[in-house]
Amino acid sequence: MEMKHSLHLQQTQKLIMTPRLQQALKLLQVPTLELQQILKQEVLQNPLLEEVDDLADQEDLDKEDSPDENANKEAEETADEDPIDWSEYMQDGSLDRTYVPQSEQGQEFLEKVPVTRTTLAESLLEQLHFLNLPQQTMTIAEFIIGSLDDRGLLVTDISDIAQALNLPEAQVLPVLAVVQALEPAGVGARDLRECLLIQLEARGDKDTLPWQLIHDHFDHLVNRRFPEIARLLRISSEEVQEAADEIATLNPRPGTSISAEDPKYVTPDLLVERVDEEYVVMLNDRNVPRLRISSAYESVIREKKKADATTAEKETREYIQGKLASAKWLIQTIEQRRKTMIKVMNCIVREQREFFDKGIAFLRPLTLAAVARQIDMHESTVSRVCSGKYVQTPRGVFELKFFFSSGLETDDGEDVSARTAKDIIKTLIDEEDKKDPLSDQRIAELLHEKGLHIARRTVAKYREQLNILPARFRRRVA
C-alpha cells in the first residue's frame, strides 16, 4: 500500500463557547462569597466599573443623565462583535447602568479579629520544651511528633525511626513513652488498642475491667462478643456491657481535638421566608458589590471620531469602548444570574411545598430535568445553579442538591423520596429493641408493610449512608 502526504479541506460544524459565555457560566455556578471576590477583582481591572458605596450614591445616580445614545451605539459598533446570540441566554436581562440587590438593608458590621489556632505538632513541641529534655532525646521526640498523622497516631514503625536516626530501637522506645505522656492523652499510640489503653491509664483506670477488656480481649470486644468475654472472665454480660459503654467514651482519634483548620461556616446564597401562607424567595447578596458604569470617561465616549486623531487617541478610545462593553455585559450577567437563581428556587419551593409545611417525611422525589422543564432552561443550567449553594429556610439551612433525590415506588402509586426512606429507616432503628435490633431484611419487610417497595440491599446502602452500624454491632445485652 502506497503511503504519501496530502492536504485535504473539510468543513465541520462545532459548538464553541466564547470566553464571555464561559465566564457567564462560571458566574452562575460560583457561590455568593466567591462571586463577591470575583466582582471586586473585576472592579480593579476595569476602570469603567465602580462600586456603589451606599444608597445615597444610587439616588444621585438616578438623577444623572445617561450618556448620549449615539455615543453608546458608536461604542457598541466599534467593539468586537460576539457571534453568540445572547438573547438565548439572557432573555430577561435588561441593561441597567447600576445593579442594586433587592434585599438592600442596613447592616451592622463588626471587625473580624483573626484567631490564632495551634496545630497538634505545635502543641506537642511546646509541651516538650517545658520538660528540659537532653538534646538527643529532643531530636528523637521531634522526629516522632513529625511522624504522627492527623489522628495523633504514629504511622512510622519504630525500626524505621531508629534507622533514620541511626540509633538502636532500645533508645527510641523510652522517648516514645515520653511523647505518649503528653496531652491530649492517646497521642503517639501505634494502634487503636494502645491509644485506648493510654487514655485509661491517664485516667488512673489501669487494671480496671475496661482496661482488662482492651488489653486481654480486644478482638472479642471489637466484634462485641460479650457473652464470650463474660464466660472467660466469669462475670455477667451486664458488667461487660457497662465496661464497653465506658470504653465508648474514649476518643479513638485524640489528635482531632487539636485542629489547625478554621471552622467552615456556611453562608446561604438564598433565603426562603414564610409570609402568611406563602413562601418568599430572596437572594442573600447584601455583601455583593453593587456595580455601575463610571462617568469619569463619559467625555471620551461622547467624543466623535476625528479624522486627524493621533494613534494614541485612537487606541485610548478603542480601549475605553472595549471596557465599556465588558462592563455592560458583566452587569447584565449578574442581573441574569440573580433572576435565574430565584427562578430555580421558586420552582423547588413549589415542588417541595409539603416539605416546607410538614417536614422531611414529606420530601418528594425531584430531578434536575424536571425543574429544567418547568422553568424552560437546560438541565446543565439548573445543575450549575444548585452546585455548592445553600438556602436558609424555616426548617434549617440546606444545600440546594438536598431537594433533589430519586423516587421509590409505593402501593398507592405515588413516589417517595429516597431521603424520606432514609428518615423512616433512621426512625425504625431509633425505636428498635436494643437487645434485639432490626436486621436489614426485617427493616425492608417493615417498609413493605408501610407500602414502600425497597430491597434489603437498598436498606443496607441507606443505613451505611446514615453512618449506622449493622444489627450485630447495635445489639446490647443490658
Image (tube, rainbow, N blue to C red):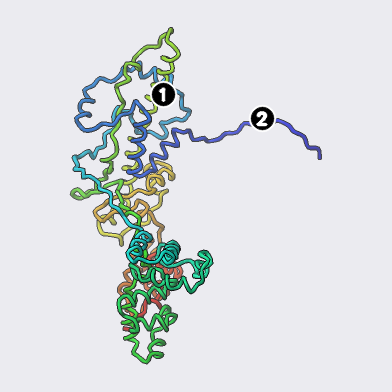
Residue toward you, 22 or 367:
22
Screen quadrant of the C terminus: bottom left
SS at mark 2 in the image: loop
Where residue 86 sits: x, y (%)?
A: 42, 31
Q: Which residue is mark 2?
A: 9
Q: Is residue 356 above or below residue 47?
A: below
Which residue carries the number 1 mark?
Answer: 322
Viewer-nearest of labels 1 and 2? 1
Residue in front for this viewpoint, 171 or 383: 171
Q: Amino acid at mark 1?
A: Gly
- Percent coordinates x, y for residue 57 in the rendering: 22, 28
Farthest residue in the right direction? 1
- Toward which corner of the image does residue 180 lie, by quadrant? bottom left
Numbered tag placed on residue 46 in the rendering = none
Query: Residue at horizontal 40%, vertical 86%?
Result: 229
Identify the amino acid type marked 2: Leu
Across and down, in percent, residue 322 comes to 41, 24
Q: Residues within 10 Å of mark 2 (few under 14, many from 20)?
A: few
Q: Residues within 10 Å of mark 1 (few under 14, many from 20)?
A: some
Question: Regarding mark 1 in the picture, which secondary structure is present there?
Answer: helix
Query: In the rendered image, is residue 447 in sight?
Result: no
Q: Report the residue that reaches farthest toward the front.
A: 134
Q: CA distance from mark 1 to mark 2?
A: 35 Å
Image label count: 2
State which quadrant residue 440 falls in. Answer: bottom left
Can residue 100 be spotted in the picture? yes
Q: Quadrant of the N terminus?
A: top right
Q: Earlier in the sequence, mark 1 or mark 2?
A: 2
User: Residue placed at 45% from the left, 13% from the top?
Assistant: 311
In the image, residue 370 above or below residue 221: above
Q: Kindly check if marks 1 and 2 are in contact, taking CB atoms under 8 A apart as contact.
A: no
